[in-house]
Structure formats: structure tokens, C-alpha cells
């Protein structure tokens, strides 16, 4: 009688990393593909993740995970969006001793992906509805993590202590991870986040960001009969943005050896063309890997708006006012080159025949807050392309490679 997969893989040395006498376990690639197709078709924008969390929970219970090993925390009660559900955590004891490993991927999608109809053609998955995104960001990552859990439980694969983690509300400022209950994660020593890009991509750092709320207050008047008595909030906002652009504080920013970005991404105000607009609301952001320079960008934006407010006056000499608030969205980080999670991730990538590519991200990742809260986390790609657009697509081969990498990392079956 042939031995089971679990029995065959049981012959390993008891250490942090196991050198298998048999080949590392391989996931069922067809089942993994079917799984991600199902998950991308499920709605779940930030704050509305209850259905996808229920889906993952049902799949875990279906392979024998006891209810006591599954936790949904209360992070959604602290986030800016009072969501339907908190972060999903599944924690398993190890079948052998070793440092606890954590695999994670966020479950929320952007509003553009509501109504996604995933279709497979020529090795790529796209949405059949041309008006929607696909939702591969980050349902592909969530499916990689779920696939690792299902394969381990279904085939009784030996593994170290494990935590599987599906945070909510990543797309609105990494909120789920920011307010996650750390004690529920079980003090992992190696953490792997699956979110974006090619399977060989290894993201070891990311930028930090501030989010700005700007309220421009002018003075209303009739735009035809008495425009001279008004103070246009629109004019103030326009002058401020023009000054930011002229002086190099909008878009890609380079000042001496400091780099960053900023963007005014939302403007709302006014109600009629025959009224001088008295109020305009704007939302903006400032990013940089350098915390001091990031604060300098915020200061420059505020200075531009305050100067513009003083320049726009009515015949009585009244000028506008600015109310600006900034919130620290997430801090930048860069992992030490010798972090065990990086070395294991790169070893797993090489193990399936790819060459790792280390990168630093100019966008925020759940790994930002994981690192800030004391859990160094490397981020790996899983085949997504053009996220947050109607052209979003998933490279099936890269996604399936990520599933292979994820299973090796979860079972500690990589050779450094």
C-alpha cells in the first residue's frame, strides 16, 4: 500500500527549515484556479467584506479546521469605515517544532470591482464585464493563502505552527492590519504577505504616507450682480494647486537628494455658476520613504494653500481661510537584508525555478503596519496586473506559481 502524502512528508528533520527527503508538496493547481475564480466573483469592497470572510471560513471548516482555531477580531469597530466584519485569523499548532509562520493577504477590493465576472482565456483571467475591474487585487493573494491552508489540512502535511491571516480594509489606508488584535496572531517569527505583481517579486520595503483634508472657505456672492463682494474658494484652490505644481510640490517631487510624491485627488465644491463658491473640499496625499521629507511635503502644501487664501480678496479686503488636517496613514519601512522571511521567500522562489527580484514599493502595503507593529513581513506577488482599472488581469501561471511558493513557505519545505 502506498503511503499518504502526509506520511511521505513526515520524514523530515525537526528544525526551523526542513530539508525534505521527498519533493516538496505541490498544490492542486486546477483547484487553486477554480478557487480564485470563485473568490474574484464575490463582492467585497472595503468595509463590506462579510461575504468573502464567510466564504473563506466555510472552506476552512470544510477541511476540518475546528471553530476554536478561527477568529474574527473587532478591528472594524475602530477603523474609519465602520465595516461589517473584522480581520479573519486561523491559527494552527505545528505538527513539528519551529518558529511560527504567518501567511496573509487582504480580502477587500476597490469599488470598481463590484460585479466582476471572471473569465479565463489563453492563460489570463479578465472580467467579462468591460466596466468592472477583476478583483485579483487581492483575491489572488487571499486564494494563495487559503490554498496553502486547504492543502495542508486536506493532505495532513507536516507543518510548523501556522497563522493564516486575511485582513480587511487594506484599500482605504491599511486599516484592518493597523487595528488587528496582535495577540490573535500568535507571535509569528516569519511573515509573508501576498499582494501584487509577478511571482518572483519580493518587496522588502515600502513608502510612508500622510492623508490630507483641506477645506477652503471663501465668501459667497452673486456671480453676475456682485462678484466683487465674493471670495472664490475655487480660485483659492486653483491658485494653490498651480503654485504646488510650479514649485515642484505636486506629482513626482525631488528636492536636492530627497524624493517623494504628492497628489490632490479629490475636489468638491459649488452648486451653481451664478454663485461665487464659498467652500471647496479637497483631499490630498503626500508620500516619501523619508519621514522628515514627507512632513516637509505636507508643510509645503499647507503653505501654498495659505498663501493662495491671502491673495484672493474682495473689494472690502476680505480674504479666504484654510483649514487643513493631516493624518499619518502609515510609516515607511525597509527590512534588513538578512531577515529570515526574505531569505525563505527567495529560497522558495528559486525552488520552483524562478529568480527572485527584490523591490521597494512606492505604495502602501499591509506589511507597513505589520513591520510598524513589530512583525517584519515580506510581500510576494501572485500574478496581478493593472489593479484598480478595468484592464486588470490575472496571469494564471504566475498565480499558480505563487500557490506553489505559499505551500512551501507554510510547510517550511525550502532549502536555503
Image (tube, rainbow, N blue to C red):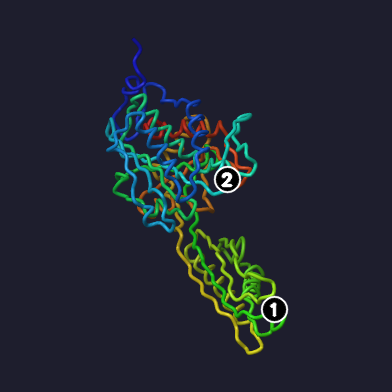
In the image, is 3 to the left or to the right of 279?
Answer: left
Tell me the residue that label 1 is attached to: 223
**Measured from the top left, where is residue 94 in percent x and y?**
29, 33
Residue beneath the point at 45% across and 58% down: 330
In the image, is 267 to the left or to the right of 83?
Answer: right
Residue beneath the point at 56% across and 42% down: 115
Out of 124 and 408, give the one closest to the viewer: 124
SS class of the residue under badge 2?
Answer: loop
- Vertically, is 264 above or below 29? below
SS class of the residue under badge 1?
Answer: loop
In the image, is 237 to the left or to the right of 177?
Answer: right
Name the outermost residue toward the top. 1
In primary-sequence order, the first of circles 2 and 1 is: 1
Tell me the residue that label 2 is attached to: 387
Out of 79 and 102, give the one closest to the viewer: 79
Q: Residues within 10 Å of mark 2 (few under 14, many from 20)?
A: many
Q: Quadrant of residue 407?
A: top left
**Measured from the top left, where is residue 287 in percent x and y?**
53, 60
Residue beneath the point at 44% across and 41% down: 51
**Measured from the top left, where is residue 173 in percent x and y?**
47, 55
Out of 17 and 36, give the one closest to the viewer: 36
- Vertically, is 36 above or below 342? above
Q: Quadrant of the C terminus?
A: top left
Amino acid at each position: 500500500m502506498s503511503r499518504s502524502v502526509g506520511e511521505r512528508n513526515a520524514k523530515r528533520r525537526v528544525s526551523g527549515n526542513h530539508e525534505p527527503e521527498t519533493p516538496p508538496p505541490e498544490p492542486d493547481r486546477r483547484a487553486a484556479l477554480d478557487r480564485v475564480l470563485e473568490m474574484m466573483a464575490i463582492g467585497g469592497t472595503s468595509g463590506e467584506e462579510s461575504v468573502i470572510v464567510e466564504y473563506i471560513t466555510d472552506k476552512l471548516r470544510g477541511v476540518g479546521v475546528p471553530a476554536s482555531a478561527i477568529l474574527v477580531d473587532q478591528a472594524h469597530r475602530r477603523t474609519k469605515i465602520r465595516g461589517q466584519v473584522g480581520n479573519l485569523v486561523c491559527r494552527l499548532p505545528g505538527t513539528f517544532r519551529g518558529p511560527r509562520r504567518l501567511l496573509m493577504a487582504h480580502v477587500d477590493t476597490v469599488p470598481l470591482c463590484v460585479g466582476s465576472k471572471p473569465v479565463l482565456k489563453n492563460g489570463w483571467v479578465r472580467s467579462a464585464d468591460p466596466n468592472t475591474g477583476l478583483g485579483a487585487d487581492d483575491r489572488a493573494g487571499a486564494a494563495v493563502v487559503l490554498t496553502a491552508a486547504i492543502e495542508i489540512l486536506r493532505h495532513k502535511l507536516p507543518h510548523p505552527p501556522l497563522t493564516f491571516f486575511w485582513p480587511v480594509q487594506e484599500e482605504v489606508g491599511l486599516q484592518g492590519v493597523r487595528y488587528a488584535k496582535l495577540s490573535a496572531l500568535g507571535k509569528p517569527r516569519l511573515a509573508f504577505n501576498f499582494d501584487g505583481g509577478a511571482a518572483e517579486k519580493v518587496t522588502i520595503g515600502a513608502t510612508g504616507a500622510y492623508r490630507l483634508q483641506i477645506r477652503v472657505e471663501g465668501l459667497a456672492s452673486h456671480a453676475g450682480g456682485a462678484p466683487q463682494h465674493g471670495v472664490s474658494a475655487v480660485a483659492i484652490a486653483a491658485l494653490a494647486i498651480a503654485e504646488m505644481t510650479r514649485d515642484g510640490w505636486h506629482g513626482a517631487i525631488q528636492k536636492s537628494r530627497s524624493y517623494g510624491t504628492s497628489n490632490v485627488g479629490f475636489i468638491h465644491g459649488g452648486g451653481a455658476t451664478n454663485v461665487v463658491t464659498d467652500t471647496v473640499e479637497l483631499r490630498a496625499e503626500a508620500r516619501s520613504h523619508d519621514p522628515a521629507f514627507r512632513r516637509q511635503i505636507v508643510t509645503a502644501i499647507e503653505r501654498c494653500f495659505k498663501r493662495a487664501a491671502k491673495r484672493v480678496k474682495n473689494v472690502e479686503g476680505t480674504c479666504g481661510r484654510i483649514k487643513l488636517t493631516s493624518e499619518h496613514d502609515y510609516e515607511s519601512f525597509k527590512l534588513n537584508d538578512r531577515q529570515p522571511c526574505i531569505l525563505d521567500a527567495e529560497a522558495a522562489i528559486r525552488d520552483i525555478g524562478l529568480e527572485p527580484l527584490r523591490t521597494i514599493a512606492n505604495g502602501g502595503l499591509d506589511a507597513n503596519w505589520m513591520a510598524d507593529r513589530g512583525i517584519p513581513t515580506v510581500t510576494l506577488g501572485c500574478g496581478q496586473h493593472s489593479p484598480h482599472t478595468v484592464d486588470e488581469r490575472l496571469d494564471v501561471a504566475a498565480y499558480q506559481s505563487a500557490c506553489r511558493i505559499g505551500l512551501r513557505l507554510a510547510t517550511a519545505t525550502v532549502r536555503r
